[in-house]
Amino acid sequence: MNKAWQYELQINGGVSDSVSDVSSDTIRKVVTSLQPGSQYDFSLTTVFAGLRSTPYTNFTVTAIDCASADWKVTNSSIKAKIEGLFSTATARNGSNVHSSRVFLQCEHKLTILPPNLNAHCEYWAAGYSVLIKWTVPEGEWTNAEVNVAGKTHTVASPETEIIIDGFQPAKKYKVSVTSLSGVRSSEPHVFYCQTDPRGSFVLRLFRHLVVFSPYCFSTGLLLSIYWSRKMTNNPAVSMEMTKCDGGGDELYEDYDNVTVLGTEHDF
């Protein structure tokens, strides 16, 4: 382009100001106050010394602000009403197909809602842990978010279960399980998990044993000591006595040996 030339731009029959720029080989003109999703015919004419070239004519289409549309997203569909002018509308899941001439009016990416999960819990570790499982959902999902007793745990796909510790036996806990895939599912699955009651019974039994074992041990020890002392206090006694003559003080050498066996009793 010759820097001495001027250019006349017309859009939809309206003439804009002449455009000229001696500082660059590229001339850029911004046209404002247009409507989105609309077609505009334009012509460009070169002007020099009062002479006009044959106009270059073409048209363009303004873009659509598709992100501002009322998109309704479910776990199986994406719907929206797009306001504006277009000749063809094509939706692609993933890659786009380009033709020889493309007027990109709208580009917007959305992820459908991940599927809802159906979960349940099972007894684990005698009630001190819970095992939460859910069925394999249909569709795409990246993570499952499990919330129990106010604490959140994340499980990556394709795992469909999680073991969580730190619970009490024979207790009921509120559980919610939500699938994630860039966005949350429409509704979490909420249910109540009952922990194994057997751990509570074992704990109570252990506590009773701890409480009553000293009493049982003490009682047995006292009974053992009592019977042991009673047996040692009943000995058999052997006594040797001599025969006296008339009650005198002198003892005779001739005497009969008399042995008397008896039992001494203490009362």
Image: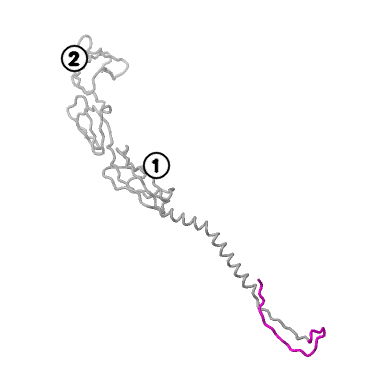
Asked which secondary structure carries label 1, the reply is strand
Q: Residue furthest front?
A: 246
| Residue where numbered disc 1 is placed | 152
Assign the C terminus to one quadrant of the image: bottom right
Q: How crowded is mark 1: few (under 14 residues within 10 Å), some or many (20 or more)?
A: few
Q: Which residue is nearer to you in this view: 187 or 31?
A: 187
Q: Horizontally, is 57 left or right of 111 in the view?
A: left
Q: Mark 2 points at which residue?
A: 13
58 on left or right of 265 = left
Lower sequence index among marks 1 and 2: 2
> Whole-Å distance between the Cαs marked 1 and 2?
63 Å
| Point 30% across, 44% down: residue | 117
Inspect the magenta stretch and tell me whether residue 255 lies in it.
Answer: yes
Q: Which residue is drawn at 19% across and 24% down?
A: 85
Of circles 1 and 2, which is in front? 1
Q: In this view, does 68 lie above or below 13?
A: below
Tell me if I can see residue 50 in this picture.
yes
Give percent across and percent down for residue 12: 19, 16
Q: In which quarter of the image is residue 115?
A: top left
Mark 1: amino acid: Thr
Which stretch did the figure color magenta?
Answer: 245-267
- 26 to 72, vertically: above or below: above
Regarding residue 143, the answer to whether it shows in the image is no
Viewer-closest of 77 and 29: 77
Query: Which of 136 and 243 lies nearest the eye of the viewer?
Result: 243
Q: x%, y% of residue 5?
A: 25, 13
Q: Residues within 10 Å of mark 2 (few under 14, many from 20)?
A: few
- Dot 2 lies on which element? loop
